[in-house]
Amino acid sequence: MGWIIALIVGGVAGWLASMVMNRDASMGIFWNIVVGCVGSIVGNALAGPLLGIQSTVQAFSLTGLIVAFVGAVVLLAIVNLIQRGRMR
Protein backbone atom coordinates (compact mmCIF):
# COMPACT_ATOMS: atom_id res chain seq x y z
CA MET A 1 0.00 0.00 0.00
CA GLY A 2 2.91 2.35 0.68
CA TRP A 3 4.11 2.37 -2.91
CA ILE A 4 0.66 3.39 -4.15
CA ILE A 5 0.69 6.38 -1.81
CA ALA A 6 4.25 7.16 -2.92
CA LEU A 7 3.13 7.20 -6.57
CA ILE A 8 0.14 9.42 -5.82
CA VAL A 9 2.17 11.87 -3.72
CA GLY A 10 4.95 11.80 -6.34
CA GLY A 11 2.45 12.54 -9.10
CA VAL A 12 0.95 15.47 -7.20
CA ALA A 13 4.39 16.85 -6.30
CA GLY A 14 5.60 16.46 -9.90
CA TRP A 15 2.49 18.11 -11.29
CA LEU A 16 2.79 21.07 -8.89
CA ALA A 17 6.49 21.43 -9.69
CA SER A 18 5.83 21.35 -13.43
CA MET A 19 3.21 24.08 -12.99
CA VAL A 20 5.63 26.25 -11.00
CA MET A 21 8.50 25.68 -13.46
CA ASN A 22 6.19 26.28 -16.48
CA ARG A 23 6.82 22.83 -17.98
CA ASP A 24 3.31 21.42 -17.64
CA ALA A 25 2.61 21.53 -21.38
CA SER A 26 5.64 19.38 -22.21
CA MET A 27 5.07 16.71 -19.54
CA GLY A 28 2.43 14.03 -19.25
CA ILE A 29 1.16 12.25 -16.16
CA PHE A 30 3.87 9.58 -16.39
CA TRP A 31 6.70 12.13 -16.33
CA ASN A 32 4.98 14.07 -13.55
CA ILE A 33 5.03 10.90 -11.43
CA VAL A 34 8.66 10.18 -12.33
CA VAL A 35 9.75 13.75 -11.56
CA GLY A 36 7.81 13.73 -8.29
CA CYS A 37 9.24 10.41 -7.12
CA VAL A 38 12.82 11.27 -8.11
CA GLY A 39 12.27 14.74 -6.66
CA SER A 40 11.22 13.12 -3.41
CA ILE A 41 14.49 11.21 -3.30
CA VAL A 42 16.45 14.39 -4.08
CA GLY A 43 14.45 16.38 -1.53
CA ASN A 44 14.97 13.80 1.20
CA ALA A 45 18.68 13.62 0.40
CA LEU A 46 18.96 17.41 0.74
CA ALA A 47 16.52 18.04 3.58
CA GLY A 48 17.81 15.27 5.83
CA PRO A 49 21.40 16.41 6.31
CA LEU A 50 20.83 20.15 5.79
CA LEU A 51 17.63 20.75 7.76
CA GLY A 52 17.28 17.62 9.86
CA ILE A 53 13.91 16.80 8.30
CA GLN A 54 13.17 13.10 8.02
CA SER A 55 10.13 12.47 5.86
CA THR A 56 8.72 9.82 3.59
CA VAL A 57 6.02 9.70 0.97
CA GLN A 58 5.01 6.12 1.78
CA ALA A 59 2.65 7.41 4.47
CA PHE A 60 1.02 10.68 3.44
CA SER A 61 2.12 13.75 5.35
CA LEU A 62 2.28 17.42 4.48
CA THR A 63 6.00 17.48 5.25
CA GLY A 64 6.61 14.62 2.80
CA LEU A 65 4.63 16.41 0.09
CA ILE A 66 6.54 19.66 0.61
CA VAL A 67 9.92 17.91 0.55
CA ALA A 68 8.93 16.02 -2.62
CA PHE A 69 7.72 19.27 -4.22
CA VAL A 70 10.94 21.14 -3.41
CA GLY A 71 13.02 18.22 -4.68
CA ALA A 72 10.99 18.09 -7.90
CA VAL A 73 11.45 21.85 -8.43
CA VAL A 74 15.22 21.44 -7.96
CA LEU A 75 15.22 18.52 -10.39
CA LEU A 76 13.28 20.48 -13.03
CA ALA A 77 15.60 23.47 -12.59
CA ILE A 78 18.58 21.23 -13.30
CA VAL A 79 16.82 19.75 -16.35
CA ASN A 80 16.05 23.28 -17.61
CA LEU A 81 19.72 24.27 -17.28
CA ILE A 82 20.88 21.17 -19.14
CA GLN A 83 18.34 21.62 -21.94
CA ARG A 84 19.16 25.31 -22.28
CA GLY A 85 22.85 24.44 -22.67
CA ARG A 86 22.13 21.92 -25.44
CA MET A 87 20.07 24.37 -27.51
CA ARG A 88 22.90 26.88 -27.86
Image (cartoon, helix red, strand yellow):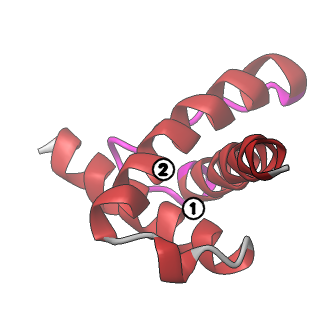
- Distance from the alpha carbon under mark 2 to that under mark 1: 18 Å
Of the image marks 2 and 1, the number of the one nearer the N terminus: 2
- Residue at image position (76%, 26%) is 46
Measuring from the top left, give residue 57's x and y in whole percent: 42, 44
Above or below, comparing residue 25 to residue 33 in the picture: below
| Magenta part of the chain | 51-64
Residue 51, quarter of the rendered image: top right
Q: Is residue 52 magenta?
A: yes
Q: Secondary structure at mark 1?
A: helix
Q: Is residue 44 left or right of residue 81?
A: left
- Residue at image position (63%, 67%) is 17
Which numbered mark, 2 or 1, is in the foreground of this view? 2
Q: Is residue 48 left or right of residue 44?
A: right
Q: Amino acid at mark 2?
A: Val
Q: Amino acid at mark 1?
A: Leu
Instruction: Name the mark on residue 14.
Output: none
Q: Residues within 10 Å of mark 2 (few under 14, many from 20)?
A: many
Q: Is residue 43 magenta?
A: no
Looking at the rendered image, the quarter that the N terminus falls into is top left
The residue tagged 2 is: 35
- Nearer to the camera, 13 or 74: 74
Residue 58, quarter of the rendered image: top left
Measuring from the top left, give residue 21's x and y in whole percent: 73, 71
Measuring from the top left, give residue 72's x and y in whole percent: 62, 51
Q: Residues within 10 Å of mark 1 (few under 14, many from 20)?
A: few
- Residue at image position (41%, 54%) is 10
- Residue at image position (76%, 31%) is 47
Q: Secondary structure at mark 2?
A: helix
Above or below, comparing residue 18 to residue 84 in the picture: below
Instruction: Name the mark on residue 62.
Output: 1
